[in-house]
Amino acid sequence: MHRHEPTGEKNYFRAQPHVLIVKRRFFRRGLAHARNLAQVGAIDSTGRGRFGELPYLENQTRESYAATHMTLLDKLERRFGFLGIPGLIRIVIGFTALVWALMWLNPNFRFALDLDPARICHGEVWRLITYIFVPQTLSFWIVLALWFLWFIGEGLERAWGPFRLTLYFFVGMIGTTIAAFFFGSNFSNGMLIASLFFAFARFYPDEVIYILFILPVKIKWLAWIFAAFLLLGFVLNSNSYRAALIAAFANYFIFFGPEIIHQARHRQEVTTRRRRFEAHSRNADDVLHRCAVCGATELTDPTLDFRVARDGEEYCMAHLPKAQTPG
């Protein structure tokens, strides 16, 4: 079905000083499958537009409005979005499979690709990139590992789009590289891949996978279990391990840290408001029933039943006046 694109209307309203054109893009499967939604409105003094509702801008220009309501990631994507690599994780999987095949023929091949700061300083600069293609195992379990990585990569690209996924991946790489040079250690790509998994769990917590194709488990529970093991390793292992963990997860904290902090503050505010409400609702002066004899209420004893006598007073069942026998 052909969808009318209101180009003429948008051009007309765009020329008006009191009109803001808002365009939103929702990524599904990369830029090729992007779906654009446009909202056009002529803003009057009430803030209501002819074709939709947009915030009323009094002294605020389009540029200042965008600067106020766009995050840093939005601004970076708007300016450098062309640098995103569509299918980045598929590329990583392809090269990892190739390196695995070469290592199967010659296990020492990995030593030419590892992140070795000393050798990088001697000119082997390709190691800054190639270490992300070194598999963690030579067994055929690599097939399941690469399939799971593909599953994660596709989900993240649908949620983020190529640019943000590329930025997330390279921030993790940069953090790992800096930590390797700082500690002079050979770091693997394991933590970097783990950061992709936790980002996926953030977007798809209720996604179900089948362990060994039998046991259904939600992603969020796997993430909690994995986080417990990482925390245990952080406590028990060396400083280089701690540095590798923090560096590889720098991307996660940059992307999700503000959201996590906001949610934590929101939960704290909700808890505080709930406690205030409960304390107010339990106020002794705000009761529905009170016995005129003993003063018991539904708060002091929730099991009590109350009745209103002929004199108009309310009594608990123990002190309810007996009906007088006619003489």
Image (spheres, grey):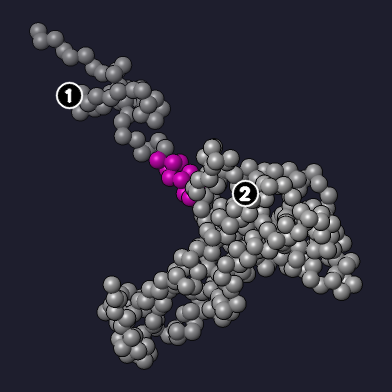
The numbered mark at residue 144 is: 2
> Gap between marks 1 and 2, in whole Å?
79 Å
- Range shown magenta: 270-281
Q: Residue 133: give x, y in percent of width and height.
A: 72, 61
Front: mark 1 or 2: 2
The numbered disc on residue 310 is: 1
Say which residue appears at 46% left-offset and 65% top-offset: 28
Q: Is residue 189 above or below residue 306?
A: below
Going by the numbered disc 2, the residue's amino acid type is Leu
What is the number of callouts on the image?
2
Residue nearest the viewer, comparing 154 with 48? 154
Residue 17 in which image quadrant: bottom left
Quadrant of res 198: bottom right
* In the rendered image, the vertical position of residue 85 relative to residue 143, given as above or below: below
Residue 221 image point, x, y percent = 57, 43
Amino acid type of the residue that numbered disc 1 sits on in the rendered structure? Arg
Instruction: Report helix, strand or loop for mark 2.
Output: helix
Q: Indicate the quadrant containing the N terminus: top left, top right, bottom left or bottom right.
A: bottom left
Magenta stretch: dominant SS? helix
Q: 95 or 224, which is in the foreground?
A: 95
Q: Nearer the viewer, residue 138 or 228?
A: 138
